[in-house]
Image (spheres, rainbow, N blue to C red):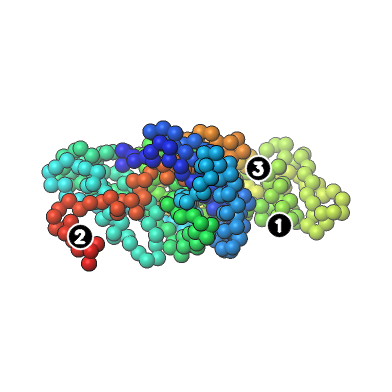
C-alpha cells in the first residue's frame, strides 16, 4: 500500500544481519515524522557457526551475536542510557525463502475501499498459505483491480463492488528460522520481525525510480547470492543461488595451491572479474601451501588469477539469469540491475554482470540512513541498513501485524471471529 505506517519519531530500532562471513548490528533512531533514520550504534564481527546461510553451531553463532550486539549497544550508550536492546529485526537468507503470487478477491458492496478492506484481502491470502513447515515473512500487495479496472496503485477511498489484490507472499523454512531464533533468544533478544536479505538490500540501496520502473537487486554474499525484483513500488519476487565470494576464494586456493587465508587476500588485492591488457605482464607473489615461511618467491601472472576467478563469477550471474528466466520475471524486471554485498566490490564485477545479464548495472550501497560511519557504508552493509528501513516503514507488510489489524466487516464474520477467539 502506498500509504505507509511509519514508526513514530524517537523510536529506537535494532537490526541484525547474520551472514556466512560477518554478523552486523545497526541501531537506529527515527528522527522525524517521515521515518528518517539516524544510525547511533554499529557492531560488526566475523561470523562463526554459520554456513551457506544456515546456523550450524548454535554456541558459536550465539557468541558472535552477543559480541556484535554489545558493540552496537556500547556505541549507542549515550542515547540508550543504559537500557539494553530487547527487540531486533533479523535477516533471512534467500536460500530459506520462497516467493509466490496470490490473487484474492473481496466484496466491497458498493462502499468506498478502506484500509481494513485491504487488510482483509491480505489476511485471506495468509490463511490459505498457513503451513506448519513454513513461516510467513512478507505479505506485499503489488497490484489492485477495482471492478476489473487495472492500474490502480492505491484503492483507498474509491467506490467499488469488488476489489482484487495481487499479493506477493514470501515464506521461510520454519526449521532454519527456529535455529536462528534460538541463537538470538539465547542472547536475551526477541525477534520483532524477519526480512529477506535481498529485499532489505533493495530497500537500502535503490532510488525510488528504480523501485518504481523495475530493477533487480543482486546481493553477492560470501556463500549465497540473493536477488530481489522490484516493480511499481514493491518487491514482486525474490530467490537465491548457493554460490558467493567464498566459492571464488576456494577456486583461487585450489588453482594457485595456497591457503584460503592467502587466497582471500590475493582476491581482494589483485582480483578482477574481467581480464585487462596489462594482466599478463603483472606478477603477483603467491605463498605456496605449507611453505609460507620458506621465503622462496612464487610469482604468478595476474592473468592466471583472473582466469580462475572469471568463470566462477560468470557462473553466479548465469545462475541468477536462469532463475529469473524460469520465474517468468524477464518481461517485468526492466533494464536495471544493482549489485550489493561484499563480493560485488571485485574489480570488473559490474562490467561482467552487464555482459552476462544484458542489463545496465551499477554498484549499490546504503543511501537512506544518516550518521552512517564510513567503515560500514559500503555495499557489504546494504542488508543490515535495509533491515532498519524495513522495520521503520514496512510495518504493513508484516504478517502478524496484518492478522492483528484485519477486522471482519460483516456481523456473521465478526461472530465467527468472536467464537474462534473465545471457545
Which residue occupies the extreme front position in the image? 82
As helix, strand or loop, the secondary structure at mark 2 comes to helix
The percent coordinates of residue 107 (x first, y second) are: 16, 50
Q: Residue at x 23, y 40 (%)?
A: 155
Name the one closer to the observer, 381 or 420. Answer: 420
The percent coordinates of residue 14 (x first, y second) are: 49, 46
In-image side of 152 versus 13 (left or right): left
Query: N-terminal of the two: label 1 or label 3?
Result: 1
Nearer the viewer's eye, disc 1 or disc 2? 2
- Dot 3 corresponds to which residue? 272
As helix, strand or loop, the secondary structure at mark 1 comes to helix
The percent coordinates of residue 250 (x first, y second) are: 66, 55
Which residue occupies the extreme right position in the image? 295
User: Distance of mark 3 from mark 2, alpha carbons?
Assistant: 62 Å
Q: Residues within 10 Å of mark 3 (few under 14, many from 20)?
A: many
Q: Residue at x 31, y 38 (%)?
A: 3
As helix, strand or loop, the secondary structure at mark 3 comes to loop
In-image side of 256 versus 112 (left or right): right
Quadrant that contains the C terminus:
bottom left
Can the viewer see residue 312 in this picture? Answer: no
Q: Is residue 414 above or below residue 81?
A: below
- Dot 1 corresponds to which residue? 254
Nearer the viewer's eye, disc 3 or disc 2? 2
In-image side of 65 versus 121 (left or right): right
Query: N-terminal of the two: label 3 or label 2?
Result: 3
Q: Is residue 62 above or below residue 385?
A: below
Q: Is residue 62 above or below residue 68?
A: below
Tally of numbered tags:
3
Q: Residue 417 falls in which quadrant of the image?
A: bottom left
In-image side of 49 versus 168 (left or right): right
The percent coordinates of residue 251 (x first, y second) are: 67, 54
Amino acid at each position: 500500500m502506498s500509504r505507509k505506517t511509519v514508526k513514530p519519531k524517537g523510536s529506537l530500532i535494532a537490526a541484525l544481519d547474520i551472514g556466512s562471513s560477518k554478523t552486523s548490528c545497526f541501531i537506529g533512531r527515527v528522527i522525524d515524522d517521515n521515518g528518517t533514520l539516524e544510525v547511533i550504534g554499529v557492531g560488526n564481527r566475523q561470523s562463526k557457526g554459520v554456513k551457506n546461510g544456515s546456523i550450524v553451531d548454535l554456541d558459536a553463532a550465539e557468541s558472535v551475536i552477543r559480541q556484535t550486539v554489545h558493540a552496537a549497544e556500547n556505541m549507542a550508550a549515550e542515547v540508550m542510557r543504559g537500557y539494553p536492546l530487547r527487540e531486533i529485526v533479523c535477516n533471512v537468507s534467500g536460500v530459506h525463502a520462497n516467493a509466490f503470487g496470490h490473487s484474492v478477491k473481496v466484496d466491497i458492496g458498493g462502499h468506498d475501499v478502506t484500509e481494513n478492506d485491504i487488510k482483509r484481502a491480505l489476511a485471506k491470502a495468509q490463511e490459505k498459505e498457513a503451513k506448519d513447515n513454513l513461516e510467513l515473512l512478507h505479505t506485499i500487495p503489488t497490484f489492485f483491480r477495482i471492478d476489473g479496472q487495472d492500474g490502480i496503485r492505491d484503492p483507498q477511498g474509491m467506490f467499488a463492488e469488488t476489489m482484487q489484490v495481487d499479493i506477493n507472499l514470501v515464506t521461510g523454512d520454519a526449521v532454519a528460522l527456529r535455529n536462528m531464533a534460538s541463537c538470538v533468544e539465547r542472547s536475551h533478544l526477541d525477534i520483532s520481525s524477519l526480512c529477506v536479505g535481498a529485499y532489505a538490500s533493495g530497500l537500502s540501496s535503490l532510488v525510488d525510480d528504480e523501485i518504481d520502473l523495475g530493477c533487480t537487486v543482486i546481493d553477492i554474499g560470501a556463500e549465497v547470492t540473493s536477488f530481489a525484483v522490484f516493480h511499481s513500488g514493491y518487491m514482486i519476487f525474490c530467490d537465491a543461488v548457493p554460490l558467493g565470494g567464498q566459492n571464488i576464494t576456494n577456486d583461487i586456493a585450489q588453482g594457485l595451491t595456497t591457503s584460503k587465508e592467502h587466497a582471500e587476500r590475493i582476491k581482494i588485492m589483485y582480483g578482477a572479474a574481467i581480464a585487462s591488457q596489462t594482466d599478463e605482464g603483472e606478477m603477483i607473489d603467491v605463498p605456496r601451501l605449507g611453505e609460507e615461511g620458506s621465503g622462496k618467491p612464487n610469482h604468478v601472472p595476474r592473468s592466471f588469477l583472473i582466469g580462475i576467478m572469471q568463470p566462477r563469477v560468470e557462473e553466479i550471474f548465469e545462475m541468477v539469469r536462469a532463475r529469473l528466466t524460469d520465474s517468468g520475471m524477464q518481461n517485468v524486471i526492466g533494464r536495471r540491475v544493482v549489485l550489493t554485498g561484499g563480493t560485488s566490490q571485485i574489480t570488473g564485477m559490474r562490467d561482467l554482470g552487464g555482459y552476462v545479464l544484458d542489463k545496465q548495472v551499477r554498484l549499490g550501497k546504503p543511501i537512506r540512513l544518516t550518521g552512517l560511519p564510513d567503515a560500514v557504508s559500503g555495499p557489504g552493509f546494504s542488508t543490515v541498513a535495509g533491515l532498519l528501513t524495513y522495520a521503520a516503514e514496512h510495518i504493513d507488510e508484516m504478517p502478524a501485524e496484518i492478522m492483528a489489524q484485519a477486522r471482519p466487516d460483516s456481523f456473521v464474520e465478526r461472530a465467527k471471529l468472536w467464537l474462534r477467539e473465545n471457545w
